[in-house]
Image (cartoon, grey):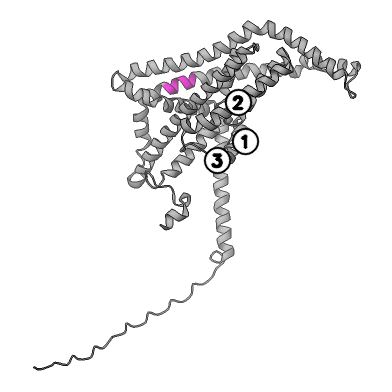
């Protein structure tokens, strides 16, 4: 048998690649230049955001009604989807719109009716309560003298008869006119959102193509789902709060209990702060009308109901997807209140929830934006 010896294999080394010369360092490529570039970018973003906020604040008469119409349309989107499959779009829109307007009108009428029906009784009880408080204050070592009280009453009378109070009344009339205008605009915009919502959204997506079109589709769907879930969940929690506290006030025979129950329902749409304000107002009315013992009982009822809905009902109804950190809620409430007052406080949390929801679907249905992903899952 002949054995063939293999020729030794010669490994050919690839020629070494020449090392590129180091890039020349300039004022904008060193570490300080990078920091300056980032600073300029941040300043540009801040200026742009400030300009947008300034424009929105000057157009609140349009922006606020449009946002409220979007929120209501998102809340009733499941109902509209079912009605569109069975009824003409115009008829379904009219039915839902009438239901919304009648519900808002019923809330306002209930408050006015309760205040007008029990105002005389509350006024008489308030006088007695104020006299009792003044008598108690007079027993304190630092109680004001009668001359100081008369001086304060005189200052209050001068303010009520001054031109400043008159200008405030004129501003109040202007605010009422703005409210009526905004309400009419909201109803009109809501009609078109309910009737032509899908067509309007398709028109807004036309400039986008490819990946950005899919991203806009996910963002729109997430916005509607988040706003609808938030409003329906908050309304459910607010109704439980209003019924529980209202029953307690009715049993204790606190004046204006129907109006206070409706006010509890409305203030529940302001997270954290709303429940405190509603409980404080109910306790003050009970203190003036029925004395400190009933007021303490009212405070206990408010705390018990809030603990019940906060620990048991809200996690089930609202869901984990809409749960924001308490610090984020407080910061959003503060910013919204500073920018637009009470209506800003109401809109701050749902808009924050929408922004966070869009971040969660930025790169895919269940894929958040790169900077918002968990670091352990990203490495996996």
Q: Name the spot of residue 141 as percent of width and height, x first.
A: 90, 24
Residue 82 horizontal/vertical position (percent):
32, 23
Whether residue 65 is visible here, answered yes or no, is: no
Q: How far apart are marks 2 and 3 (CA)?
A: 23 Å
Element carrying mark 3: loop
The residue indicated by pointer 1 is 334
Q: Assess disc 3: are there few (<14), some (14-19) or many (≥20) residues with their C-alpha within 10 Å of its C-alpha.
A: few
Q: Are there few (<14), some (14-19), or many (20+) residues within 10 Å of tag 2?
A: some
Numbered disc 1: secondary structure: helix
Q: Nearer the viewer, residue 134 or 299?
A: 299
Q: Tell me the magenta residue range.
A: 184-190
Prevailing secondary structure of the magenta residues: helix
Name the N-terminal-most of marks 1 and 2.
2
| Camera sees residue 326 | yes
Name the side, left or right, on which 279 lies relative to 75: right
Q: Vertically, is 55 above or below 371?
A: above
For residue 325, the mark is: 3
In contact (CB < 8 Å): disc 2 and disc 3? no
């Amino acid at each position: 048998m002949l054995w063939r010896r293999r020729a030794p294999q010669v490994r050919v080394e690839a020629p070494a690649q020449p090392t590129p010369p180091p890039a020349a360092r300039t004022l904008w490529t060193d570490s300080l230049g990078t920091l300056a570039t980032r600073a300029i970018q941040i300043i540009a973003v801040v200026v742009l955001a400030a300009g947008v906020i300034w424009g929105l604040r000057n157009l609140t008469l349009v922006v606020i009604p449009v946002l409220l119409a979007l929120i209501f349309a998102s809340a009733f989107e499941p109902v509209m989807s079912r009605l569109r499959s069975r009824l003409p779009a115009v008829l379904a829109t009219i039915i839902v719109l009438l239901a919304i307007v009648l519900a808002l009108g019923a809330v306002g009428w209930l408050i006015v009716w309760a205040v007008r029906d029990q105002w005389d009784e509350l006024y008489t009880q308030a006088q007695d309560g104020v006299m009792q408080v003044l008598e108690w204050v007079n027993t304190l070592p630092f109680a004001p003298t009668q001359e100081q009280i008369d001086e304060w009453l005189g200052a209050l009378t001068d303010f009520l008869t001054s031109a400043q109070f008159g200008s405030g009344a004129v501003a109040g009339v202007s605010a009422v006119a703005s409210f009526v205008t905004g309400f009419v605009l909201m109803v009109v915009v809501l009609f078109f959102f309910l009737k032509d919502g899908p067509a309007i959204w398709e028109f807004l997506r036309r400039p986008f193509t490819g990946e950005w079109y899919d991203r806009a589709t996910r963002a729109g769907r997430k916005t509607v789902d988040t706003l609808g879930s938030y409003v329906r969940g908050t309304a459910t929690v607010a109704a439980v709060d209003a019924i529980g506290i209202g029953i307690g006030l009715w049993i204790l025979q606190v004046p204006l209990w129907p109006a206070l129950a409706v006010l509890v329902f409305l203030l529940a749409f302001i997270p954290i702060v709303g429940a405190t304000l509603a409980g404080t107002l109910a306790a003050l009315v009970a203190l003036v009308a029925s004395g400190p013992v009933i007021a303490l009982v009212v405070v206990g009822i408010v705390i018990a109901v809030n603990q019940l809905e906060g620990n048991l009902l809200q996690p089930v109804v609202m869901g984990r997807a809409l749960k924001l950190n308490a610090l984020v809620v407080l910061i959003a409430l503060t910013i919204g209140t500073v920018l637009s007052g009470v209506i800003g406080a109401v809109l701050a949390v749902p808009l924050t929830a929408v922004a966070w929801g869009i971040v969660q679907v930025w790169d895919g249905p269940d894929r958040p934006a790169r900077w918002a992903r968990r670091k352990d899952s990203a490495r996996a």
